Image: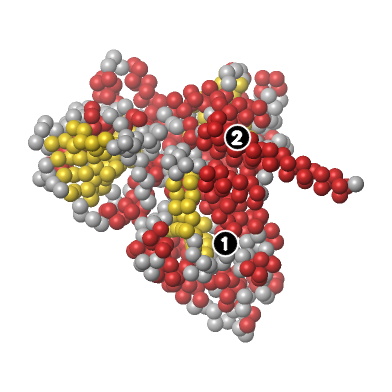
Amino acid sequence: MTEFNLKTASQGDMAAQAEQRALISASLDVGGVPAVIQDARCLLQEQPSFLNFRFIRQLVTSLPPEETVLKPWRVALLSSFTIEFIHDSLIAYGFTNGLRIEIYQPGFGLIRQELLNPTSALYQFMPNVTILAIEGEDWLPEIYTTFMDTDPPGQGLGDITTRFQQEIGSLVRTFRNTSTAPLLVHNMAQPRLKRAGVADLSLSDGQSRFVADLNRSLCQVAAEVIDVHLVDYAALVNYFGVRHWYDSRMRLYAKAPIASSMLGHLSQEYMRYFRALGGLNKKCLVVDLDNTLWGGIVGEDGIKGIQLGPNYPGNAFVEFQRVIMDLYRRGVLLAVASKNNPADVDAVFLSHPFMLLRKAHFSALEIHWNPKSDSLKRIATQLNLGLEHMVFADDNPAECDQVRRALPMVTVIQLPRQPEHFAEALCTEGLFDTLGLSAEDLHRGQLYQQRAQAETVRFASDNLEDYYRNLDMQLSLAPVDSASRARTAQLTQKTNQFNLTTIRYGEAELSQRMANPDWLLVTVGVRDRFGDNGIVGVMMAKVGEERLHIDTFLLSCRVIGRTVETAMLAFLFEAAQALGLKALRGRVVPSDKNMPARDLFEKHGFSKLHEDPGGTTSWEFDLSSEPVRRPAWFRMAA
């Protein structure tokens, strides 16, 4: 009877999933791609199965090429082992992250041939990102497989690490000399079997020590070559466990060592990097309060009755708050959307001894009884953020479903029933991950507080000019250098609203331009009476045909509305005139989000030259005309 029940349940689950897939297909015509992405995300959260991966891949294939909701993303996958089976999950998770993934993959074991040949299909593919998926057994059998063949074990293998570092370094530098695409490299997992058993850790030259040395070598290579990033494959294997991660039969039969059930997890790991590189990582976390930041309902249980403190389950909520605090310190904006009495909430924030998060940590608070989707829209407007950059976390399934249906572009995390699993539910996908932490990231919460203070000055001023002068703004313009290169790349990847072309660049591409005297790359910093906003703008322009061609012109939403863009254009006029050029030329590539930037050239007296069927416009300003002047309320930094 038990066997029959299990079989029936399995058949029931399969039937339910089949029905869910049918509903997703049908909803494409009704709700559009954003709604289908939300439904597909829920499907994969419930059952990340081969059938569901394949279904979503087929759905993506059926979408017309001109579908603008999805960002085209070319992935080159070079491996030392068979990994073709990952394609379905990689494309499926790409879809749920707003990417339309195209994969180039040669046969396994062809890493050297592809990287060393400048005319290889890899370079012709022109990937957005390249992955080196390496297993230690394939690359270094002396350490992983034949370790005990030496006498004593490990003897004579001391130069292996040096040779490995030299070879990997040479391959990576060759790739960088040929391609500007970001490169992801797996680090090395510990051996599946310790050949010396428990004695390995007591050996001066044990496998564990060798693998640790190899990974340190990889870190050094990544630090020395621009836009090379390590995928912590070792941590992934350790998290899921060797017995679950590897498939012994397929490893020997088809040189496909990773178990099929684990490929989805590896795809999700890659997504952390794809989101960061493609400007798709999330910027704002919006949380509920009752049964989310604390256990219980403060309006019913009172401040002393809620669960928050050193003992379970209160300590689980403290742990969750600590993880949210870590996100705040990494530059993630925090906000609250709660159906609650504001006075009760204020009492908790002000008086509860175990509250780690305080009101000052939140850039926006919506505490009332209106629908939470309305709260999210108000928060997005207040912070000048797109809804697609927001994550909403709530314990209530009904509230989560309401937000999903009303705002399909918002990523919704329905927290599990047990609070001890909240932290993992929030962090497992790495939705907020970035490739580095800039000074602006570390102080973003404070920067938005400064922005709020500046808005207060705006309301208190009689007119805009008074507002600008009261801000006491100081402008700093500086060439992009090694210190500002990472921040510059980050701004091109993340800035959407005031961005003329929304073209994304990696550090390697920027370095290439920095070395070219025809290119002008400039960062823009703004300081006001409330503090330093850091680097908030980027300009990139190239000299050609007696003109200065603007390639990139962007500005952080924190300083939109302060005429910084006029000061930036004035700088480009001066630079072009100093070079003896005749005109300044630029273009506007419309996107779903860059409406605030589209009239920049028209407002500043440029003449429209052309508009193509897609809406891209090109503009020119004759430098013999009266140029744009820097607004008088800006002081220039020394």
Q: Find the residue positioned furthest to the bottom.
A: 151
What's the residue at 52%, 57% (across, down)? 231
Res 144 seen here = yes
* Secondary structure state at the residue bearing disc 1: loop
Residue 210 is situated, as x and y percent measured from the top left of the image, at 56, 71
Q: Residue at left 62%, top 75%?
A: 145
Q: Nearer the viewer, residue 126 or 375?
A: 126
Spatial CA distance of label 1 from label 2 is 32 Å
Task: Say above or below: 273 vs 339.
Answer: below
Give neighbour class at mark 1: few <14, some 14-19, many 20+ (Cα, 10 Å): many
Name the quadrant containing residue 236.
Answer: bottom right
Residue at which label 2 appears? 26
**Residue at the extreme top of the image, as rendered:** 462
Q: How is the image coloured?
A: secondary structure
Query: Can you identify the residue that label 1 sits on?
Result: 83
- The percent position of residue 106, horizontal first and vertical second, equals 49, 64
> Taking the image as drawn, is residue 229 in sight?
no
Position in image of residue 472 (x %, y %)? 27, 28
Looking at the picture, which amino acid does disc 1 mark? Ile
Query: Which SS class for mark 2?
Result: helix
**Which mark is drawn over residue 361?**
none
Left or right: residue 502 versus residue 32 is left
Specify the quadrant of the image occupied by residue 411.
Answer: top right
Work out whether 343 lies above or below 568.
Answer: above
Image position of 168 with respect to 46: above or below: below
Q: Residue at x 57, y 18 (%)?
A: 370
Q: Earlier in the sequence, mark 1 or mark 2?
A: 2
Q: Is 272 in front, or is 464?
A: 272
Q: The residue under label 2 is which amino acid type?
A: Ala
Q: Residue at x 77, y 41 (%)?
A: 12
Q: Picture coordinates of residue 621 (x, y %)? A: 16, 35
From the image, which quarter does the C terminus lie in?
A: top left
